[in-house]
Image: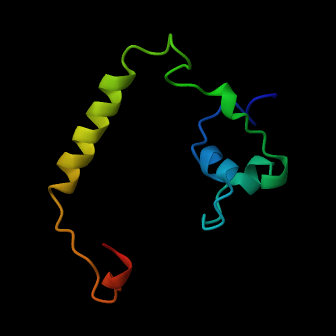
Amino acid sequence: PRIFTDPSSFWSERWLLAAGDPSLPPSDSATRGFDRATLVHNETGFLPFSHGPMNCVGKTLAMQEMRMVVCALLQRFRVRASESLDSGNFE
């Protein structure tokens, strides 16, 4: 296919592999029959909110909802800096 390799199957790793993240654990891509060298990934083939002045009217609402979800999740965790962190690199 022109836009994605194996577009009819759910394969969420395709976004990570296309980004070239070397820290990824080995996935089942070898059993699917394609490798990173032959991965087809056209970023313009996936525009969830559209593009340009006539884009999705719900984009702002969706982004605000995601901010609220992240904030709600982070409030449930205790976050602190590591003792080994060099605080001289930060303001």
| Quadrant in the picture for residue 30 | bottom right
Residue placed at 75% from the left, 29% from the top?
A: 3
Q: Vertically, is 84 above or below 49?
A: below
Q: Vertically, is 30 above or below 12?
A: below
Quadrant into which the N terminus falls: top right
| Quadrant in the picture for residue 20 | bottom right
Which residue appears farthest toward the bottom when viewing the image?
A: 84
- Would residue 43 be found to the left or right of residue 33 on screen? left
Q: Judge whether residue 2 can be spotted in this image.
A: yes
The one nearer the camera, 83 or 36, is: 83
Quadrant into which the C terminus falls: bottom left
Q: How many marks?
A: 0
Residue placed at 28% from the left, 32% from the top?
A: 64
- Would residue 16 be found to the left or right of residue 42 on screen? left
Residue 46 location (% of width, % of height): 61, 28
- Would residue 46 be found to the left or right of residue 35 on screen? left
Residue placed at 38% from the left, 79% from the top?
A: 89
Residue 72 location (% of width, % of height): 18, 47
Which residue appears farthest toward the front when viewing the image?
A: 91
Which residue appears farthest toward the top when viewing the image?
A: 54
| Quadrant in the picture for residue 63 | top left
Residue 53 location (% of width, % of height): 51, 13
